[in-house]
């Protein structure tokens, strides 16, 4: 019976929609994060003096707030994904489960 349920879920058009939407959204968020991180690392590698400039008269360089901003961006993107997963993806999952229950 588990194989039968698996096949029903797999063949459900809403399941294909869920997989497509979730994969596409996760790819976009990953691309944003990797791009920002890659650019940051490239600046460190090829122009370290850019991030080494001091802010004001203190010892803090401009690289510190930029690095912290990248970490904060990670949390923001995670929150965006979680919000969409809880609202849109969970609804689709529940619809798929209801469809499979009625078919059994």
Image (cartoon, grey):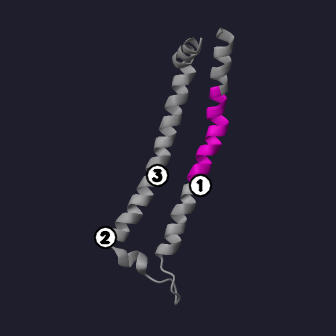
Are the residues flagged by discs 1 and 2 in contact, CB closer than 8 Å?
no
Taking the spot 65% from the left edge, 9% from the top edge, the residue there is 103
Lateral position of residue 50 relative to residue 60, left or right: left
Q: Residues within 10 Å of mark 1 (few under 14, many from 20)?
A: few
The percent position of residue 2, horizontal first and vertical second, equals 58, 15
Lateral position of residue 18 relative to residue 52, left or right: right
Magenta stretch contains residue 76 = no
What span is colored magenta in the figure? 77-93
Q: Please tell me the numbered disc located at residue 32.
A: 3
Taking the spot 51% from the left edge, 29% from the top edge, the residue there is 19
Inter-mark Cα distance, 3 to 2: 21 Å
Q: Please tell me the numbered disc located at residue 76.
A: 1
Which residue carries the number 2 mark? Answer: 46
What element does badge 3 sit on? helix
Lateral position of residue 79 relative to residue 21, left or right: right
Q: Please tell me the numbered disc located at residue 99.
A: none
Residue in front for this viewpoint, 84 or 103: 103
The percent position of residue 59, horizontal first and vertical second, equals 51, 86
Inter-mark Cα distance, 1 to 3: 12 Å
Taking the spot 46% from the left edge, 74% from the top edge, the residue there is 63
What element does badge 1 sit on? helix
Are the residues flagged by discs 1 and 3 in contact, CB closer than 8 Å?
no
Choose the circle earlier in sequence order: 3 or 2. Answer: 3
Determine the residue located farthest toward the bottom in the rendered image: 57
The number of callouts visible is 3
Q: Residues within 10 Å of mark 3 (few under 14, many from 20)?
A: some
């Amino acid at each position: 019976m588990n194989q039968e349920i698996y096949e029903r879920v797999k063949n459900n058009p809403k399941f294909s929609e869920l997989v497509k939407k979730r994969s596409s959204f996760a790819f976009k968020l990953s691309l944003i994060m990797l791009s920002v991180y890659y650019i940051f690392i490239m600046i460190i590698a090829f122009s370290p003096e850019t991030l080494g400039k001091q802010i004001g008269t203190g010892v803090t360089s401009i690289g510190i707030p930029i690095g912290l901003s990248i970490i904060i961006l990670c949390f923001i993107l995670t929150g965006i994904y979680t919000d969409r997963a809880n609202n849109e993806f969970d609804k689709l999952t529940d619809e798929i489960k209801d469809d499979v229950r009625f078919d059994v």
